[in-house]
Image (cartoon, rainbow, N blue to C red):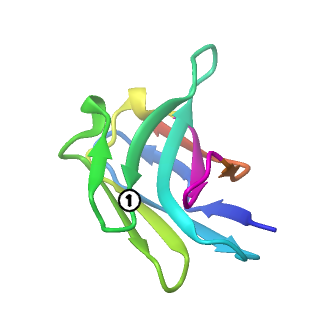
Amino acid sequence: QVQLVESGGGLVQAGGSLGLSCAASGISVTIGAMGWYRQAPGKQRELVARIARDGSTNYADSVKERFTISRDNVKNTMYLQMNSLKPEDTAVYYCNVERWGSTTRYWGQGTQVTVSS
């Protein structure tokens, strides 16, 4: 039913920027909140940023004032603009979608972000 595809990952120098996109297809249910998560080797997956349907947002303390999450409810897309990247931002970034009024969650396959010093 719901398929999520992330794009925009890559290799950048510290202090650089990257923009990630998540495209949702096969939508047959109402989408609730959407979010970006990341996971580095040997670490648990953590929330990076989350955005509700009304546009309200939450960010991990480590990315506040550097990352910006946004969404387009008509196009069923979500974005993450990452500025002032640091080596510790290196991880696989995953798109996550919550079904409205449900505990059902959908995940993308992830996109690698690598930040070199």
Residue at (81%, 68%) from the top-left corner? Answer: 1
Identify the residue shown where x is 39% and y is 67%: 53
Label 1 Cα crowd, 10 Å radius (few <14 / some 14-19 / many 20+): some
Secondary structure under badge 1?
A: loop
**What segment is highlighted magenta in the picture?**
91-103
Is 75 left or right of 25, judged from the image as shown? left
Q: Amino acid at mark 1?
A: Ala
- Please state the horizontal and vertical placement of residue 96, each as a whole percent of the image: 58, 51
Q: Is residue 116 visible to us here?
A: no
Q: Is residue 64 above or below residue 96?
A: above
Compared across the picture, whether 90 is left or right of 62 comes to right
Q: Residue furthest front?
A: 101
Of the pair 83 and 23, the residue shown nearer to us:
23
Dividing the image into 4 quarters, which one contains the C terminus? top left
Q: Which residue is mark 1?
A: 52
In this picture, residue 57 sits left or right of residue 89: left
Which of the 4 quarters of the picture holds residue 88?
top left
